[in-house]
């Protein structure tokens, strides 16, 4: 009887899988919405706004990533965002103007800034495409920008089913 030998071609391929989930912000993400601080959800009255901020329980934002936004269709003076940031700064990990997605995008970029792309010199890299966490497009664009100068190739997906993104040209003879 002939003995069957299974060969794991993926393991032998030399592909390195890079899971962007490791760069996902670790910690609580919260949104500070100005809408509830507006008169009739339309107008910011400075005196009332300042009084409301003074009575806000800022401890709810302790060690959180916070996005400052206004979901109402209102004109908000720039100083209002600055005032909110001044209250949040002592308690929050990070503060961003925009919605939760913009906050996540900026945190991804910040986390990717510490990525050592040079350590992938002449490697074949697969950027993992599926996972438990939704990875923003911003992260995929940035990792491509970081890796491209160094790697032999970039692929997207899973090692068993990849989509080619970039292949370093062969040296000219």
Image: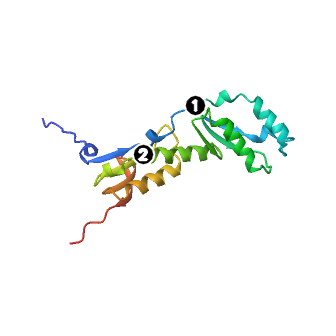
User: Is 134 on the left-hand or right-hand side of 34?
Assistant: left
Disc 1 and disc 2 in contact, CB within 8 angstroms: no
* Residue shown at 26% from the left, 66% from the top: 170
Measured from the top left, where is residue 158 in percent x and y? 38, 46
Instruction: Say which quadrant the N terminus sits in.
Output: top left
- Badge 2 is on which residue? 114
User: Is 25 on the left-hand or right-hand side of 52?
Assistant: left
Measured from the top left, where is residue 9 in percent x and y? 25, 45
Instruction: Say which quadrant the C terminus sits in.
Output: bottom left
* Residue shown at 67% from the left, 42% from the top: 68
Asked if residue 92 is positioned above or below residue 96 in the image, the reply reads: above
Measured from the top left, where is residue 32 in percent x and y? 69, 38
Measured from the top left, where is residue 67 in percent x and y? 64, 41
* Residue shown at 45% from the left, 48% from the top: 113
- Badge 1 is on which residue? 63
For residue 172, what is the image quadrant? bottom left
Compare residues 144 and 81 and report the one nearer the observer. 81
Asked if residue 124 is positioned above or below residue 45 in the image, the reply reads: below
Q: Residue furthest left?
A: 1
Give the structural element (helix, strand or loop) at label 1. Answer: loop
Residue 70 visible (yes or no) = no
Residue 172 visible (yes or no) = yes
Give the structural element (helix, strand or loop) at label 2. Answer: loop
Q: Residue furthest right?
A: 40
Compare residues 64 and 99 and report the one nearer the observer. 64
Cα gap from disc 1 to disc 2, whole angstroms: 21 Å
Q: Residues within 10 Å of mark 1 (few under 14, many from 20)?
A: some
For residue 20, what is the image quadrant? top left
Q: Which mark is residue 71?
A: none
């Amino acid at each position: 009887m002939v003995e069957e030998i299974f060969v794991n071609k993926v393991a032998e391929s030399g592909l390195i899988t890079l899971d962007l989930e490791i760069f996902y912000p670790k910690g609580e993400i919260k949104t500070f919405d100005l809408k509830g601080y507006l008169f009739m959800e339309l107008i910011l009255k400075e005196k009332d706004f300042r009084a409301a901020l003074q009575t806000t329980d800022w401890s709810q934002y302790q060690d959180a990533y916070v996005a400052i936004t206004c979901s109402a269709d209102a004109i908000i003076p720039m100083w209002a965002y600055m005032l909110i940031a001044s209250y949040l700064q002592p308690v929050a990990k990070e503060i961003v103007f925009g919605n939760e997605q913009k906050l996540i995008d900026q945190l991804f970029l910040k986390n990717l800034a510490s990525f050592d792309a040079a350590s992938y010199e002449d490697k074949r890299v697969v950027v993992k495409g599926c996972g438990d966490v939704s990875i923003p497009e911003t992260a995929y664009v940035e990792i491509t920008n970081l890796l491209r100068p160094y790697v032999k190739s970039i692929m997207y997906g899973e090692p068993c089913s990849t989509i080619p993104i970039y292949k370093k040209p062969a040296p000219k003879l």
